[in-house]
Image (cartoon, rainbow, N blue to C red):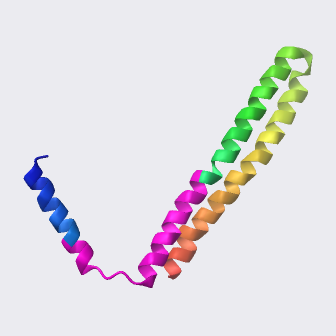
Amino acid sequence: MDIAHAQETAKAVVETAQAMPIDGRVILKAACYLSAGLCMGIGAIGPGVGEGYVGGRACEGVARQPELQGQITRTMLLADAIAETTGIYSLIIAILLLFVIAPAI
């Protein structure tokens, strides 16, 4: 892309932005979209770290006591399911922000 084309595109974006009035509704919708993204981004870090930690410790436990593999695996899966609920809660909040609150504004 050459510089002249980039300048034309930048001018078109500036003209469009100047023609669009920014009122309270636009700011609230932008806040809803931004907060939904942050909710999922931050809300997925905890379950990811927690499930990885539990899985690693389960592998260590099976390596130390292979005869308890069934019990360790069952406990690991239960702990992973509990850790995943935080991610599901953040997904529900993000969906509410995107599809219930933002259209109502």
**Who's the residue at 12% across and 61% down the image?**
8
Query: Is residue 60 within the magenta segment?
Result: no
x%, y% of residue 24?
45, 83
Q: Is the magenta stretch mostly helix, strand or loop?
A: helix
x%, y% of residue 77?
80, 37
x%, y% of residue 22?
36, 80
Whether 17 is drawn above or below 2: the answer is: below
**Who's the residue at 86% across and 22% down the image?**
69
**Who's the residue at 68% across and 55% down the image?**
88
Whether 65 is drawn above or below 48: the answer is: above
The quarter holding residue 53 reads top right
Whether 22 is drawn above or below 49: the answer is: below
Closer to the camera in the image, 93 or 14: 14
Query: Is residue 34 within the magenta segment?
Result: yes
The quarter holding residue 38 reads bottom right
**Who's the residue at 64% across and 65% down the image?**
93
Q: Which residue lies furthest to the left in this view?
A: 4
What segment is highlighted magenta in the picture? 15-41
x%, y% of residue 45?
64, 46
In this figure, what is the number of numbered marks?
0
In the figure, is residue 63 to the left or right of 47? right
The quarter holding residue 54 reads top right
